[in-house]
Image (cartoon, rainbow, N blue to C red):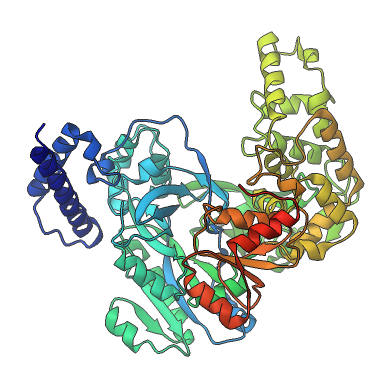
Amino acid sequence: MPESEYNEARSEIERLSELLHRYQREYYVEGRPSVSDLEYDRLFDRLAELESKYPELKQPDSPTQRVGTEPTETFPEVEHTVPVLSLDKAYSSNEIADWIQRTTKRSGQALSFVVEEKIDGVAIVLYYEAGRLIRAVTRGNGFVGNDITANVKTIRTVPLRLPEAIDVAVRGEIYLPKDRFEEINRKMETPYANPRNLAAGSLRRIKSSEVARIPLNMFAYEGAFPQQELSHIEVLEKLTVLQFRVSNRIGVFSNRLDTEDLEARYPEWSFGKFEELPEYIEQAASERDALEYEIDGLVVKVNELQVREELGYTGHHPRWAIAYKFESPQGTTTIKTIEVQVGRTGRITPVARVEPVQIGGSTISNVTLHNQAYIEMLEIAEGDQVTVSRRGDVIPAVEKVVQKNEVGNPVWHIPEKCPSCGSRLEVYGAHHFCRNNQCPDQVRGRLHFFIGRNQMDIENLGPETAELLIEEGFVQDLPDLYRFDFERLKGYPGFGEKKIAAIKAGLEKSMSQPFRVVLPSLGIPEVGPNVTELLIRAGYTSIDKIIRTAEQGESEKLVDIKGIGEKTAATIIEEFSRPEVKQRIEELKKVGLQFETTAADKTIEGEDSIPPLFEGENWCVTGSFERFNPRSKAMEYVKAGGGRTSSQVSGSTTHLLAGSGGGSKLQKAQQLGVEIVSEEEFVERLKDEGIQIA
């Protein structure tokens, strides 16, 4: 082939790619197409033809990549590099006002707040390197999500490359417009309940070519820009410059911020003082039905990102943001009876059995009453006519008593004894508890939780088999699962040789589950996947380390872990000090479950052998490095050595690991008198402890 012809093809491919990227942005993001569909299709077809003829010239972010790829078998798990936690919730403007007051007081300075619509869609994190989309990851458990990059690339409002060659993580919400949902759902053999469910189901399809046929859309609302100190408003501006689709339905509220310049630049935004926020919330709720997408509330965020860093996180949500949930759909019904449920931790929950009522497209027949204080607050009795809502559009709850029962039933009270085992109930905080570890309902709850798909995921051992094991007295606690001779089930209906062999195989396979799966599967209060990750990252890489801390009552060590609050720390200390919990763990150890991280689990070599050389220190990292790629690898050594890490330099930062191109973090560290550590010094410090870095 003549070289001139090859070079001409290269130039044309580059030209067509640039044009089509621009036309896609104009059509899908800006809503101002400059060419006809016919002209766009002509250029697209020409690019596809050239790429087919010269496949080696096809660019990784080519516009033709949006058509879809060949199917893959699974969506691999990927660790997030930015926090992806849930939000705390409020249900009234008064609660929002109280939260703003508390947050301002905690920060010790005047603040401004940004209000955004809470899109009812699928959360996604987009990771760009040198301006190119390399990964799109679902929220997952907040620490680890699934890589669905090929499917997300089919969404036209997701940029495949940015106009700047920067590294950035962008959070957004993928949604399906309401009118398209109705159109698509009518053709479904099994219709979806709402646009969010259809969007989520589409993104989980194995063939991305099928996803490409679903008109999904996306709004971007957060960006983690390294080495740049921005306000949230500036983040939104930066996202817009980078050609992301950012909502223009934004509110900015402050009693100190001068918004004159912002109002001129963003005439679609709303601006006001704190006292004007309730009116803004009311207006947003009234406009909800007219939007082209579903929203289930608003999100109020601290605008100042440096203050966000100082406020930090709890184990479940950031302290610098809160979700305002719109008034939930409601219905009126009658309470038939009230019963109590005993959870796996012994917690007693009163549940009202009500006359079936339709709320938000679902039939509600059971409603939680939370605790005795809640019942007494509303003066609830059997036979009462009540208003029921779906709080957060999910959890059914009694909102108020509309009409008292006519037979004189008094306010209902939780019984003195456990309905499952007869033990006397004890009150801790706002809840009643059964403290009998062998309570049948607790055993049942622990067992069902342990074998569940989101926990140990024991194949071929389902709820019905678990019930049989409990009812026949074969299993009285978790370790019994691994010690029971399942051959004894021969003769029971449905339990032939193949079934029994499959159960045994499932149990055998579960014994290889890593520590980060086993620990939250125990059902210990407060110790779910998120807290488990925080503990492991903080150096608690075995159950023995956790138990030792609990026995010594060192709750302050747990509170020092970013993301773990005082309540969670106190619960961990209490639970892992209980003899029955420690006994259960010892028995599970004996049967072979994993209670410490193995080489396959570890993020760095020799993780368990690293001494606490960073204990009491708070590290930040900036720049690029020769030995640590990605640079977060260096911070894994800090965490394994008992130190803490943060994404920004602040007054609490003790050390900054500085590579080449330190930027603003380096300047701020110098201003604050933070100790600056070079890569060589960091490596030498590790070497002094016998830790070798390649």
Viewed as shown, does residue 646 lie left or right of 49? right
Q: Position of residue 245 (x, y in %)?
A: 31, 61
Quadrant, the N terminus: top left
Looking at this view, is 285 or 558 the one in front? Answer: 558
Viewed as shown, does residue 105 lie left or right of 132? right
Which residue does the image show at 87% across and 52% down from the upper left?
548
Viewed as shown, does residue 438 lie left or right of 194? right
Which residue does the image show at 22% across and 34% down from the upper left?
55
Residue 263 visible within the image: yes
Looking at this view, is 510 or 652 the one in front? Answer: 652
Above or below, comparing residue 237 to residue 539 in the picture: below
Q: Position of residue 292 (x, y in %)?
A: 30, 58
Which residue does the image show at 54% across and 69% down from the upper left?
322
Q: How many marks?
A: 0
Looking at this view, is 346 or 107 the one in front? Answer: 107
Residue 283 visible within the image: no
Q: Position of residue 391 (x, y in %)?
A: 55, 59
Viewed as shown, does residue 396 lie left or right of 496? left
Above or below, comparing residue 188 to residue 22 in the picture: above
Q: Position of residue 494 (x, y in %)?
A: 67, 14
